[in-house]
Image (cartoon, rainbow, N blue to C red):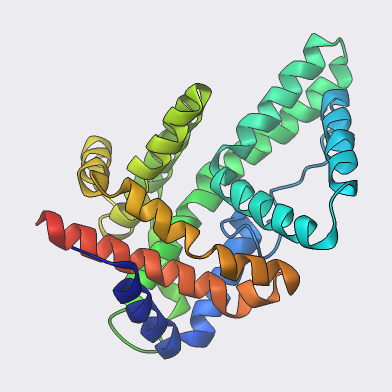
Amino acid sequence: MWNRKELKDKAKKVVHKNYWTAIVVCFLIALFTGEFGTSIIGIWQSEDSMDPNYIVNNEREENFTETLNETQMKIFEAIEANLNSAMKSQKYIFKIWDAVTSFHINQTRLGVILSIGAALALAFTILVADPLIVGGKRYFLKARKGSNTKIGVVGEIFQKEHWLNVAIIMFLRNVYNALWYLTIIGGVIKTYEYRMIPYILAENPNIKRKEAFVRSKQMMKGNKWKTFILDMSFFGWNFLSVLTFGLLSVLYVNPYNAATIAELYIELKEEKE
């Protein structure tokens, strides 16, 4: 049975052996996908919604944050960053909702602009961001086996015999997750149930959709709560990262976190074999 300390100890060794390439891989993934919530804002994560309702909600959030002291604000930012990271895969759905809302309030021109933006965000997520996330998992699975793992490992997922299958399965995972989030608690449970799908794809990019979902469900059975606690064990690191404006995440926390979850995947896989 796995435990957090062993996973983290193994992860630290992986990061130590592949430090600079691990930093570059995580930086690129954070930049293009928003995978790591406390480091940098991904290029596709723009929150420049022109929906009046968005502006009102944003103003409410600003009024709320104005009531917090400096320490409370840092904690709020750490929590918000992690929530944004958890919801990264569904963000294009919010853009689609903005477009629909604009048409509903008779702002046709705005609706068209937002629809184009939503379509571009959807295409980018499916064809680039999600396969890149899987490529990152592939890198860390290979990095645990040696030193100075090549960054090019990430690009192996984009080979024509893998790319489409990975993109489709990741897209379906995101859609199912989004639908489950309509039930609130169901979304959280399914997020953890589907947690190992990117790693399964990283190892087996041509796997069938049904098998990928079944494997992840089997691996996470009885492990969801422990994995949640594992995630929460990084909260202190993420808080410190906020204090350093994300620099600590870029230079250490992101690779450390990614390597830890890769170790978790290996442990869960071996337990089920």
Name which residue lies at 69% across and 23% down. 97
In this view, 244 is above or below 176:
below
Residue 42 vertical position relative to residue 10 in the rendered view, above or below:
above
Along the line of sight, the residue nearer the viewer: 53 or 21 = 53
In the displayed structure, does residue 108 sit left or right of residue 98?
right
Tell me: 227 left or right of 145.
right
x, y percent for residue 67: 88, 46
Residue 264 seen from this side: yes
Where, quadrant-wise, is the C terminus in this rendering? bottom left
Q: To which quarter of the image does residue 31 belong? A: bottom right
The image shows a total of numbered marks equal to: 0
Outermost residue to the left: 273
Residue at position x 59%, y 54% in the image: 33
**Residue situated in front as seen by the camera: 186 or 172:** 186
Would residue 162 be visible to someone looking at this image? no
In the image, residue 177 above or below residue 239: above
**Position of 38 compared to 48: left or right?**
left
Residue at 42% across, 41% down: 191
Query: x, y (%) of residue 240?
Result: 66, 72
State which quadrant residue 248 falls in: bottom right
Residue at 33% x, 41% y is 193
Residue 252 lies, in percent from the top left, at 56, 79
Q: Position of residue 218 (x, y in %)?
A: 20, 43
Viewer-closest of 170 and 156: 170
Horizontally, is 115 left or right of 48 in the view?
A: left
If the image is split into quadrants, where does the N terminus sit? bottom left
